[in-house]
């Protein structure tokens, strides 16, 4: 059975800068040996949702048109690791990352937070409360946010390599 690659969904469902940035990000993930696998069972059956992994560890999750049309969303996976706690980042990258910390609005209603108890976390040197297990969330990232995501996911890859 033929499986659509993420690039095909991006070209079919996204337009303009959103499409351009999503294609750029997918190419960057592949160039960095990341594996993209579509999830098509259970909750994800009717969604366009991909898990990105390096070796057997999760790096991020990607959804196309999750919240709206022409919508590209990327969540990080913290996997219980402390890779995001205080890595060496420039101040602007930290500010962008802080702006995209995935603070849960209602931890009692969020399935992920209920299971893992959305928690207090130190993110890039700053403490946040009620952080979802998908600790970062970028919606339609612009060029500056794309550069930030690439830096952060390089750090996650190094964390995986470091064991």
Image (cartoon, grey):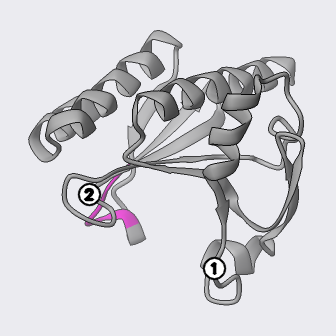
**Residue 75 in the image, given as x and y percentages of width and height:** 55, 49
Quick check: marks 1 and 2 in contact, CB under 8 Å? Answer: no
Q: Is residue 4 above or below residue 76?
A: above
Q: In this view, does 106 lie above or below 77?
A: below
Q: Which of marks 1 and 2 is nearer the N terminus?
A: 2
For this orientation, the residue located farthest to the left is 12
Q: In which quarter of the image is the C terminus?
A: top right
Q: Is residue 90 visible?
A: yes
**Residue 160 in the image, given as x and y percentages of width and height:** 77, 25
Lateral position of residue 114 relative to residue 6, left or right: right
Q: Name the residue under label 2.
A: 65
Q: Is residue 8 above or below residue 33?
A: below
Q: Nearer the viewer, residue 53 or 128?
A: 128
Mark 2 secondary-structure assignment: loop
- Determine the residue positioned at 53% across, 13% down: 32
Q: Name the residue under label 1.
A: 105
In reply to whether residue 47 is colored magenta, the answer given is: yes
Q: Residues within 10 Å of mark 2 (few under 14, many from 20)?
A: some
Mark 1 secondary-structure assignment: loop
- Determine the residue positioned at 68% across, 30% down: 92
Q: Nearer the viewer, residue 36 or 141?
A: 141
Q: Mark 1 to mark 2: distance in Å?
A: 21 Å
**Residue 127 in the image, given as x and y percentages of width and height:** 89, 56
């Amino acid at each position: 059975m033929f499986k659509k690659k993420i690039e095909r969904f991006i070209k079919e469902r996204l337009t303009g800068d959103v499409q351009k940035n999503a294609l750029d990000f997918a190419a960057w993930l592949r160039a960095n040996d990341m594996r993209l696998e579509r999830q098509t069972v259970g909750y994800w059956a009717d969604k366009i949702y991909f898990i990105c992994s390096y070796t057997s560890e999760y790096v991020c999750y990607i959804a196309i048109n999750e919240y709206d049309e022409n919508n590209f969303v990327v969540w990080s996976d913290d996997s219980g690791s402390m890779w995001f706690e205080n890595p060496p980042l420039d101040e602007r990258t930290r500010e962008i990352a802080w702006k995209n910390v995935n603070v849960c609005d209602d931890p009692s209603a969020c399935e992920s937070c209920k299971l893992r108890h959305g928690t207090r976390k130190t993110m890039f040197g700053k403490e946040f409360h009620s952080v979802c297990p998908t600790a970062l969330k970028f919606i339609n990232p612009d060029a500056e946010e794309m550069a930030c995501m690439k830096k952060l996911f390089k750090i996650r890859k190094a964390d995986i390599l470091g064991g």
